[in-house]
Every structure is written in C-alpha cells, then in structure tokens.
Amino acid sequence: MALRLHTSFINGKRLVNSGRIVKRRNPGQLNQEVSRYRETSEESAEMAMGSGANAFAAWSDKPLTHRVKILESVLASLDARSEKIATLITRENGKTLPESRAEVAAGIADSRFHLKDALRSSKQRIRSAVPDTRAHLQHEPVGVFLLITPWNFPLATILRKLVPALVFGNTVVVKPSEYTSATASVLFDILASQKLPAGVANLVLGSGPVLGPALIKHDALRGISFTGSTENGLLIANSVAGRDVRLQLEMGGKNSLLVLADADIDSAVDSAVVGAFSCAGQWCTGTGRVIVEDSIYDDFCQRLIKRAEQIVVGPGHIPSTRMGPLISSGRLKSARQAVRTAIHEGAKLACGGKKPRLRSGWDGHYLAPTIITEVNESMTVFADELFAPVLPVVRARDFEDGLRLANRGTLGLSASIFTEDRTKANEFLKKVEAGIAHVNLHTAFRVPDLPISGWRDSGRGIPECGRFGRDFYTRPRSVYLKT
C-alpha cells in the first residue's frame, strides 16, 4: 500500500505544491519505509506566521468555554485513535509500543490539566481593601507563538505547548522535528476535523536551518516555546534578544541519580534502569549519570550490570522488546564515540558498547544497554549529555561529595536521591541545582500539575506544564471597578 505524503498545514489547508519529498525509515528496521513528507519553503513559513496573525483577533475573541469545547473534542478524538497514533510513533521514532502508548496518555493528561486550569483561572477574583471597589485579574492572550518540538516525544511535546496556547486564545505555528513529521501531521488531521478555524493552528514541515530564520524573524512572532538541545536553544535566545518575544526553552539535561549507602539498592537499580534505558536513553529527564556512595559501589554496579544485560533490544513493535533503537545513524555514531572516549580516558566498559545480537531483518540503529564504571568528574562522559543508552557510574565518598558531584556542570534539569535518611533527603531537595527533584523515584517521574523546570543551561524563561502554561501564554491585566 502506498504511503501517504504528509504536507504542511497553513490557514486551514494542506499545501499541495512545495519542496522535495523526504522519505523516513523505521530506525529499528531500516528496510521499512514508514513515512513521507514534503518540505516546505521559507515563503510558506512566512505565510504560516501571517496566517496565525490574521486569525488571532477572531480566535482570542471567542469565549473561553468555546475554545475549551473544541479542544476537549480534539482530545477525545486523540483518545479514540490512541492505538493507531502510538503505532505510528513507534514506527517513526523506534521506541517500544508501551512507551508510545504512555506518551499518548501523558500528552492527553497534560492537555486536560491545561483545560481545567484555564477554566479555574477565569474565575479568579480579588477582595478589594478599598470601599466601593471590586478587583479581578484577567489573563489575556498574547499573539502568535512558534512551537518547536523534538522527535523523542513527537506527540506529547506538541500537545503540552499547543493546548495551553490555544485555550488561552493564542494562535500557533508548529515546527516539529523532521524525523517525526507524520506524527505531527496526523495530529493536525484531528485539529482540522474538529472545525478549528483556519489559521489558528499551522504546521510547517522541513528542516530547522531552512525554516527557523524565516519563522523567528517574522514581525508577528510574540513567543517561542522550544524543546531541544541547549546549543540550539541558546541560539534562539540570542536571535530574539531585544525583541518583544517571550521565550520558553526546555533544553538539555545531565541528570544525576545519587544512591547513598542506606538506600534500597534494588529499588535504586530499578530506577537507574528505567531512567537510563527507557526510550533508548533519548529523553531529557532520563538518568545521565549514577553517583553511588563508595561502600556500596561494587554491589550496586554488579546488580545494575546484571539488569542491563537482561534488557531485550529490538524493534519497538515486538512485544518482547524492552528497548528500541536510537533515532539515527548519527546518534548511534555519537554514542559509540562517547564510549570509546570514556575508555580512552580511563573508565571501564562494564557491559554493552556495541550492537546487540539481533534477529535477521532487524537492521537498525541499535546499541546494547551500556554501563561505564570507574568514571570520575574529569572525564568527558561525566559532563556531556549523551542522549543514548549509555550510563556512567561514579563513586562518591559520602553524601556531601555525592551532592557536590550531582551539582557539577552547567545543566540543571532533574535529579534524584535514594536514601532512607530524611534529613539528607531534605538537604538534597534544598541544595541540588535542578528544577525537578525526587526522593526514591527515577529522574523522569512527573505529574501534569507541576512544571518541567530547567535550571541553569537546561532552561530559560517561564517553564512549561502545570499552571505555568497559563503564565507563559497570557498577559496579566489587573482590573478595578467602581461599584
């Protein structure tokens, strides 16, 4: 059966004639073509921004309840098609089908929180201390937002930006990763089916270097929500410096899991495995390094290595698979180079580091779950975000040394401590340089009510998710009335 050709969606219509056709292959089965999309042009990107600007006044003037109703219908349609969408994510991205299902569910849960929060925010009233006056706070829309989203969570990341932007009356242009264009395109099928007015939500397909400048320099731009690398995020920040453009940058992480001597070791190992090897290590809040108190280091490593070696690697749609491939040959090459560099610098390859044995026909960008031990803070692998199933394990003399190591570097997204000592846990929560902190949980654990807050070079601006969705996508207006 011929594959559908996905195209950009601008002003309520699919573009018919645009750039070259790009074919994507399943990263877990390279002989399988999974999607096709047609690249759009800089001119079309500018047209998308203009379309959003033209639609803003009418959309922002709609009652909040009207916008909520449309978006609730979008989520209901997503829910009804969740299995098909999860299957598409697995084919495009490579992650396991359970991971894709979890992504769809998480994206819907985040979105439903934003709809409820918008309704709560509309009822906020202030008791005035001045006689014969009333006061309240209004949350006014801002304008056109550019949403730049990654391939590792191709649906959930769009939803947690798009839904709060639209429900508060803004319009959007979505620029997804070119690796996962089909997932974004199917979401726009659903938006169109729910009679979303033309121009309110626009989709541009193509590469960032080509489309990015045209989108970012447009006069209509009022905000950018970006999820991706720290390098690209900071480039975006510099490009809009001095302009009236809001920034929400969710960038890289080198997330530490600190394990103290009194911890439940098996529970800590379980969390390290989940954080390091789910999504093949390709998630921002995943575990980037484990720091283990010296007295239990050898025991912890032995258990961790045993667990890593039991992980079944293969295509994401196979029920027995527990870890899929990396997204691309470039990511695989980078991961293998990081392993070689670590060994050259004196670390020990405890397991993995090479392509696992796979069934015939499962040719893809695979790397076996990899553990690197005897890592110290001078090594490249200690500091660099790898975005791969490669986990460095570091010795710490004691809690204070472990906390110091956890705070090393320039990134500050997520961190976790495993301990039964509540005093040390509380000190960790107070002093760790990360916007997300956990006790006896893996580093990627989160709920829709709270933000994804990157500190230092892991984030800029108002964070996304939780009630901060409202704060980023609205302008506060204080209103006073004489009674």
Image (cartoon, grey):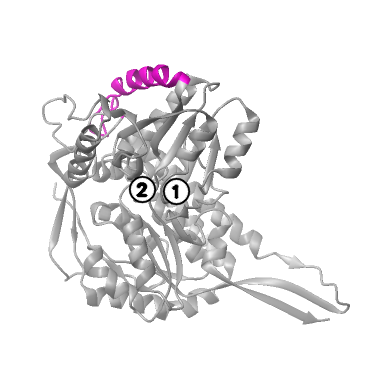
Give residue 456's position: percent from left, percent from top.
46, 55
Q: Nearer the viewer, residue 73 or 396?
A: 396
Specify whether 71 is left or right of 301.
right
Q: Secondary structure at mark 1?
A: helix
Q: Is residue 376 left or right of residue 400?
A: left
Q: Which residue is mark 1?
A: 107
- Residue 429: x and y in percent read 59, 41
Q: Is residue 469 visible?
A: yes
> What residue type is disc 2 on?
Phe
Nearest the eye: 466 or 304? 304
Q: Quadrant of residue 6?
A: bottom left
Seen from the viewer's position, the closer of residues 322 and 351 is 351
- Badge 2, how many Cα within 10 Å: few under 14, some, many 20+? many
Query: What is the C-alpha distance between the residues marked 2 and 1?
Result: 9 Å
Write down the residue under mark 2: 153
The residue lying furthest to the right in this view is 131
Residues 453 and 420: in front is 420
Which residues fall within the magenta stretch? Answer: 295-322
Residue at image coords 55%, 56%: 114
2 or 1: mark nearer the eye: 2
Pinpoint residue 285: horizontal percent, then vertical percent.
42, 43
Could you tell me residue 470's position as x and y percent? 56, 62
